[in-house]
Amino acid sequence: MNITVAKTAGFCFGVDRAVQIVDGLLDRQQRVCTLGPIIHNPQTLSRLAQRGVRVVETPQEVSAGEMLVIRSHGVAQAVFDEMESRAVQYVDATCPFVAKIHRIVAQAGEKGEIVFIAGDPGHPEIQGIIGHCKGQYHVFKNHQELHDLLNNILYEKNMPVCIVSQTTFSVTEWKICLEILKKVYTNAAIFDTICNATANRQSEAVELSHKNDIVIVIGGRQSSNTAKLLNVCRENCEAYLVETAGELPLERLREAKNVGITAGASTPASIIKEVLATMSEIKENTDPVVMEDNADSSFAEMLEESLKSLNTDEKVRGVVVGIAPNEIYVDVGRKQAGFVPLSELSSDPNAKPEDIVKVGDELDLLIMRTNDQEGTIMLSKKRLDAAKGWEEVAAAAEDGETILTGVVTEIIKGGVIAVTNGVKVFIPASQATASRSDPLDDLLKKEVRFRIIEVNRGRRRAVGSIRSVLKDERKALADKFWETAEVGKEYTGVVKSLTSYGAFVDLGGIDGMIHISELSWGRIKHPSEVVNVGDTVKVYIKALDQEKGKISLGYKRAEDNPWEVLRRDYPVGTVVDATVVGMTTFGAFARIIPGIDGLIHISQIADHRIEKPQDVLAIGDVVKAKITEIDFDKKRVSLSIRALLNDEASEDTSSEAQEDASEE
């Protein structure tokens, strides 16, 4: 099976910007609500809801302390007025392309022009556009509705007319509608407001549908642009709409030779990746996946493409003049307002603009796109950083010994991604930690040191190894340890792992083992009864074998030896509360202190003859007994209950004798 992924699949600029704004606010512990769903994708909405994002329908529903985010679809002017009157805190994430339509229709109304809007009247974007119209307007969702509309209105052909469209309107339908309008209104002011990303996405979808047996369209069922992609594909081949990989028509895909994949503007790259991974596993012997380019493509590959035609005219130096949650603003000495989206500021998806730059900083930047109509220029910092960083990575690969520093930004299937000087380096799971059992999740957002062990200059891909650096560091620490190690020396270490026979302790570059018998003076079944992984423990060296690299550690202390405690605190004659822990035919064993059991001979259990210990005692009974004998050499203690009974009898007899004497 050949799988081709559309170049334009996934988040568009406006949607990505809106989602990043919400995530940025949440990262700063801001309570967030959105005016309607921020995106037409249930998986993203669920993720944001889990982070505490509420969806409200009106500004009246915003609670004190909440920040209201206006989604990329935009809203009517009346909504802004209401927010201002209610002093609602808000962030406007309206897509710049949608905001442009708002300005166009508002200006048209001020001029007395009649506005024609191509789009779905029930879509929030259209409702927002209508809310900026200041005069007469008409909405139509296809050429048939437009035809009926024109037959029912009686405007003169020389009336001033302004024509705009929903940013996600069908390109094919738009062309038909324009032909109809031009015949009626020869002097119409036409604004092609279909987003370039939408136009390219639809055009590419048509191309995919001609070249493949099946096209999978990934996106939310409530997404307008996703629905249009599905429709244009179905005109030429089988097409299926799926929201997640779980909805793929697997049986049908197994029969297909060529499959295309595209995705709506509200589809996260993670879902595209899941779908692609599922399809790639359908047949083990299918041809490799052909990824022309998409939202999940390798950053290095995209960098390579972006730098192919780079010249000095595309490089500029700018001064930071403002910082927002999702972008920074820079003065590049041109008439356009320069901005750098967060996605183009850093390769670290967890980075915050205020942590990277401050107002007044001078930056070398790459011009990505100039929009003269909007008066803006989009710039990139990370791509120039990556170009410089790549040279360092390539040099490190040739050297083989140079250690680079980077931050782990992603945990992915098979390893982690670390960013160093703007370059993403893949570190396989087998090279990411000192031991295969160590979890990768602990590395996320951590600074790590690694070597470059492999590069592909053609594709600008690099593979690194953290383990090789850790191995060298541990070797240096181990060498230092052996220089000073000696039996009896004490160390503070961390319990690294447990086995049934002992606990392994990291002494700082080298591991030693505490045998289970050395963990406690009493008997234990498993080391976890005394220590746990991660515990900090004080140990001492019992034995060393440098040739084999083995270190035996002691943990229990001599002063804690129960026989020493017995010698100090429990001399012969001491009366103790002992717990019966065992029975034999000749007596019962009772625990005096943890680690020491004494024998109560059958003759010492009662002050009369008994047949067996069980006639008087039971396991678990706590009895008072006198220590009558201790043999420290043989580790034996003798106890007697009878001795205490005899003592009590003697006291009673003595008391009676005294009473008789006093009576006489």
Image (tube, helix red, strand yellow):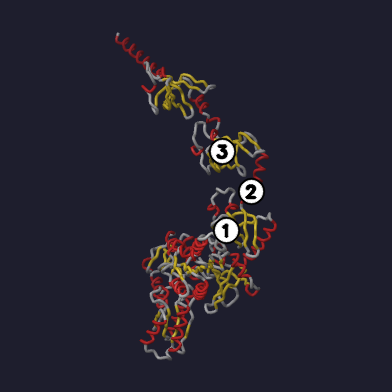
Which mark, by number, is residue 538? 3
Mark 1, Cα crowd under 10 Å, few <14 / some 14-19 / many 20+, is many
Mark 3, Cα crowd under 10 Å, few <14 / some 14-19 / many 20+, is some
Query: Which three-letter amino acid code belongs to the residue tagged 2?
Result: Lys
- Residue, disc 1: 417
The x and y percentages for residue 14 are 49, 71
Tell me whether circle 1 and circle 2 mark residues in contact (CB < 8 Å). Answer: no
Spatial CA span between label 2 and label 3: 25 Å
Q: Secondary structure at mark 1?
A: strand
- Residue, disc 2: 471
Q: Earlier in the sequence, mark 3 or mark 1?
A: 1
Query: Which three-letter amino acid code belongs to the residue tagged 3?
Result: Lys
Q: Does 459 appear above or below 77?
A: above
Camera-nearest residue between 537 and 153: 153
Q: Residue at x 54, y 37 (%)?
A: 501
Q: Residue at x 38, y 72 (%)?
A: 82
Which mark, by number, is residue 301? none
Q: Secondary structure at mark 2?
A: helix
Q: Earlier in the sequence, mark 2 or mark 3?
A: 2
